[in-house]
Image (cartoon, helix red, strand yellow):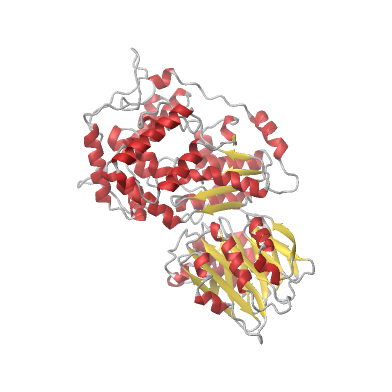
Amino acid sequence: MCGIVGTVAGAVPDGHNLGPQLRALLQLSETRGSEAAGLAVLTSSAMQVVKSAQSASSFTRSEPFRSALAVPPSDRFRAAIGHTRLVTNGSAIYADNNQPVEQPGYAMVHNGIITNPEVLWDKAGTAEDERAEVDSAALLAFIAASVTKPGATLEDGVAAAFANLNGAASIALACAEAEQLVLATNVGSLYIGVDADGRLVVFGSERHIVAEFAKDRRAAALPPITEVFHLAAGEAMSVDMTTAEIRPFALPPYQSRADGHPSSAPRVAQAAGDDGTEPSWRRPLRRCSRCILPETFPFITFDHNGVCRECTHYEPVSVEGDEALERALAPYRSTDGSPDCILAFSGGRDSAYGMHRLVKDFGMTPLALTYDWGMVTDLARRNQARMCGALGVEHILISANLAAKRRNIALNLKAWLRKPDLGLVPLLMAGDKHFFIHSQQLAKRVGVKLVVFCTNPLEMTYFKTGFAGVRDQRYYTGGLGNKLRLAAHYGKGFAKNPGYLNRSLLDTAGAFRASYFTRHDYVQLFEHLDWQEDKINELLLERYAWETDPSTPTTWRIGDGTAPFYNWVYYEAVGFTENDTFRSNQIREGEITRERALELVAAENSSRWDRIQEYLDLLEVPIADARDGVARLVASLENSQLP
C-alpha cells in the first residue's frame, strides 16, 4: 500500500528548518508507492499542503516542497505529515486524488483501502456532487463531520470512523486549531520513534523506515531517536504538537460488512465478433476420457481407453494435516504480538484463506507481503484491505516502478504480437517473479525466519513451459537440464525476434534467475491443509464480504490483470486454458465429475473482454493489434505439430 511518514517536533528548540529530515523520510518510504507524493506542514500560524504526481525522490527536489518548508524564524514548526502514493482509485494526474487530503483545518494521510466509501460520505452528509474520487477523502469527511457534534473530541471522531469503515486504514490526521496529531491503525502499519526526553515523535509505515531514518546523517540535527515502538492493530494515539506528549487510546473492534461493494461492471461488453457472440473453437477436440485435457495439450498421449498420460502418471495430493502444520509453525510463533512469519499475499482466494487459517486457527502473527509489479488489480487490493482490516494483519506492499514495469511488459507484448510464439507467453508474466527475492529480503530485514506460501496444489500450469518444448517443468523445481532447455528456447525466440532485445531484458533475466536459480525456502500451507474450493469460497464470501469479479464465474485468478489476456491467447490457439488443467486435477482428486468440469470450463473459458481491454489500455496496445497477432498465431498452428 501507500506510505505515510511524518514528525511532531514542536518541542525541539530551533526546529524550524526540517527540509532535509522530511526529504529523508519521504525517500525512505518511496518503495511503498512512487506514483505521487505530498506533504502537509503545520506551523504556529498556518498549515500548507503541497503534492504532486511524481515520485518522492522527484517531489523532494521540487520548488513547492522547498517552499512549504521555508518556515521563517518568527514562526514555529509544529508537525509535518507526508505521503508516497500507490494509485488504487482516482488518477494521480488530478491533484485532489493525491494526499494529504484536506478539510478546513484538517490534513490527513492514509495508507490502505476503504471498501465502503459511499457509506462514509452518506454519514458525513456530503452531497454527491461534492464527493471526491478517493476513499481517503471520505474518511476525512466523516471524521470532520463527527467532530462537529456537541462534546465530541478528535479522538471520538477517529474512533467513530474506524467503527464504520470497511477495509484497511492507517492514518495520520493533523488538526491545526487543536495543534493535535492523531495516529491510528486497524492493521498495525504504523511505527513510532521517540527521543529520550519526549521532545520528538517520528512515524512511518514500516519499522525499517523509522530505524533507517534514525541512522541517516540528515537526522543528526534532531534529538536522537532512542526507541521505536509499534502501534498495533486497533490502537491509536494523540500527539500534542507543541509538547510532543503522547496520549494513547483504543479503536473499536473491526466488523466485516457486506455494504459498499464497488461496481465492477464490464466496461466493454464484447469485442469478439460483429454479432457480439463469443467465438467457439475451430474444431471439436479429442479429450481425455477421464479428465478434460484436449489433444492440443503439450506432450499428451492417450492409451487404448482414451486416458491421457497426465491421468496415468498423476500422484494424488497428500496432506500432512493440522497437527503437522502446528509442529512446523510452533517454533516460530511469537508471544509478544510481533510478526512471526512472512505471508505471500497476492489478494487471491488461496492466500486470503491462508491468512485466515494462520491467524484464527494457528495463532500466528503474519506480516503480509505483496509485490506490485503493475498487474495487481484494484479488486485484489480491495480484498487485501478487507482481510487485513478484519484480521488486524500488517501489510507491506512493495511497489516496483510501475510505469517502468508496464513499459517493459508493453515492449515484450508488442514484440510477441509481431511474431507470436506460445512458448514465449510466460514472458508477459516475468515481472512478478522478483517477489521471491523481495520475500527473502523482507524476512531478513524484519528478523523473521519463516516464509509461508499458499499455492493451490491443483494449480499445475506447467503446460506453459511445455509449449517451449520442456516437459513437466513443475513450478520452479525442475532439474537443471529443463532449465537450460527453457533458457535455450527463450534465446532462440529472442534471436528470431529482435524486438525482445529491449530495455526490459535485464528485468526478464532477473525474473528467470529469481524463478529457477533462487532458493525457494518456504512452508507451503496446502502441503499440510486440505484445499477445498467450496469451503474456501464460502468462508471468504460470508465472513469477510470478499469481492468477486462479474466478468467471470470463477474466483480464481481474479486479482491478476494479466490472466484474462494470456488465457484468451491459449484458448484461441489451442482450445484450452489454465481452467482446464485445474478442473482436470479436481477430477483426478475426486472433487468433481468430468461432466461438471466440462460445464465449468465452458463458462470460465469465455473471453473476459472487459478485463482484456483494461489490460491493453494499461499497456497502450490497441485491441486490433492484439487480435491480429493472435490470429497470426492461430494460422501458424493450424498445420503445425504441437509438442
Is residue 145 at all visible to an observer of this figure? no
Vertical placement of residue 496 versus 386, above or below: above
Q: Residue furthest top?
A: 304
Residue at the image point whose x is 71% and y is 63% from the top: 193
Q: Is residue 318 left or right of residue 360?
A: left
Q: Nearer the viewer, residue 609 or 2?
A: 2
Instruction: Please identify the quarter of the rendering in which residue 472 is found.
Output: top left
Q: Return the residue found at the far right.
A: 197
Q: Nearer the viewer, residue 461 or 591?
A: 461
Classify the position of the N terminus by image quarter.
bottom right
Q: Is residue 290 left or right of residue 46?
A: left
Q: Is residue 562 left or right of residue 254?
A: left
Q: With respect to residue 121, does 497 lie above or below? A: above
**Residue drawn at (40%, 49%), measured in percent from left and top?**
504
Q: Quadrant of residue 10?
A: bottom right
Q: Position of residue 329 (x, y in %)?
A: 68, 36
Q: Is residue 627 left or right of residue 37?
A: left
Pick the residue in front: 553 or 8: 8
Pinpoint residue 30: horizontal percent, then vertical percent: 54, 60
Res 530 visible: yes
- Whether 469 is drawn above or below 384: the answer is above
In the rendered image of this protein, does residue 308 appear above or below residue 161?
Answer: above
x and y percent of residue 397 in the render?
55, 52
Total count of labels: 0
